[in-house]
């Protein structure tokens, strides 16, 4: 079945850039997502990218997609302490054109040191 | 933007009792609702998918008689954990799909921390 892998931890200093990487297995995924989860809270959509795009930038966030290698990354520029959270990569599971479930990675815990 | 209100945020119940968790889409109609369970330091595990007006589809290994899902309207879905046991203690999150075809249309509730004592 589909699988999404990402590293579990990342530690950076405030002001540096953070890069969180993710690999996925379903080459037919049309959309890929990055979600942020703060302690005890639900998931907040940060950004998403359509599979025919290589890059998407939204303020401090840059998403890179290498569809050939099934590799997705999220870069956070000028990382702040408020960015400390768990970041989930997810791919959409589509069935014959209908929109299905999201398959999540285990999440990367980002720690930002002052 | 789209908001899903999930209640309660925390609940402690005695073993053997039932607990109902509600998810409401506040400003949109949720044609599909996904229910997830999240174990500590782990990813979200899909439990079931429900479409308004029809029976929920449960993932393999999820007991449908234990985790009752009702999606009676386009704005409300409920998950009832029946005869709860300590091993049911977990973080439960719903996600509402805002119509078909919109890639960004998944909106998550804020989660419910269930503790069964």
Image (cartoon, coloured by chain):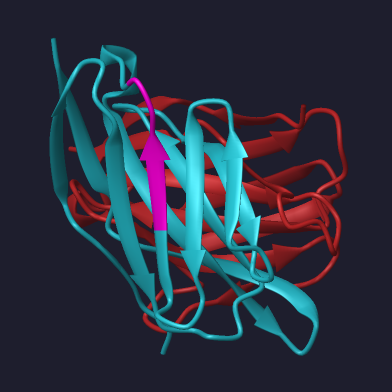
Chain colours: A cyan, B red
- Residue B52 shown left or right of residue A3 in the figure: right
**Where the C terminus of chain A falls, by quadrant?**
top left
User: Per the image, is B17 magenta?
Assistant: no
- Residue A60 drawn at (x, y percent): 49, 27
Where residue B47 sits in the image (x, y, percent)? 47, 66
Q: Can you tell which quarter of the image residue A53 is in?
A: bottom right
Query: Where B23 sits versus B60, above or below?
Result: above
Q: Nearer the viewer, residue A26 or B27?
A: A26
Q: A1 left or right of B77?
A: left
B81 or A43: nearer the viewer = A43
Quadrant assignment, res A1: bottom left
Task: Report the side of A81 relative to B3 (left or right).
Answer: left
Q: What stretch is highlighted in magenta?
A: A73-78
Of the pair A2 and B67, the residue shown nearer to us: A2
Magenta segment main secondary structure: strand
Whether B90 is drawn above or below B13: the answer is below
Instruction: State whether residue A78 appears in this view.
Output: yes
Question: Residue B94 placed where, x, y %?
Answer: 56, 47
Residue B81 lies, in percent from the top left, at 44, 52
* Rendered residue at 85%/63% (across/down): B100
Residue, x 64% and y 38% (percent of image)? B23
Question: Would you place residue B20 above or below residue B4 in this image?
Answer: below
Q: In this view, does B10 lie to the left or right of B101?
A: left
Is residue B82 in view from this perspective?
A: no
- The image quarter containing residue A24 is bottom left
């Amino acid at each position: 079945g589909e699988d999404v892998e990402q590293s579990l931890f990342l530690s950076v200093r405030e002001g540096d850039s953070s890069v969180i990487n993710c690999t996925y297995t379903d080459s037919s995924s049309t959309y890929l997502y990055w979600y942020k989860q703060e302690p005890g809270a639900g998931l907040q959509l940060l950004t998403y990218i359509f599979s025919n795009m290589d890059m998407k930038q939204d303020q401090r966030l840059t998403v890179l997609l290498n569809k050939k290698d099934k590799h997705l990354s999220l870069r956070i520029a000028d990382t702040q302490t408020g960015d400390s959270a768990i970041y989930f990569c997810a791919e959409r599971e589509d069935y014959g054109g209908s929109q299905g479930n999201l398959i999540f990675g285990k999440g990367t815990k980002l720690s930002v040191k002052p | 933007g789209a908001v899903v209100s999930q209640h309660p945020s925390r609940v402690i119940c005695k073993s053997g009792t039932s607990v109902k968790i509600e998810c409401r889409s506040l400003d949109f109609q949720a044609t599909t609702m996904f229910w997830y369970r999240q174990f500590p330091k782990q990813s979200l595990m899909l439990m079931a998918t429900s479409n308004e007006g029809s029976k929920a589809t449960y993932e393999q290994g999820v007991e449908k008689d234990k985790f009752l899902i009702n999606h009676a309207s386009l704005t409300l879905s409920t998950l009832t954990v029946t005869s709860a046991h300590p091993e049911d203690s977990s973080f439960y999150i719903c996600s509402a799909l805002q119509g078909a075809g919109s890639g960004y249309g998944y909106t998550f509730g804020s989660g419910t921390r269930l503790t069964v004592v």
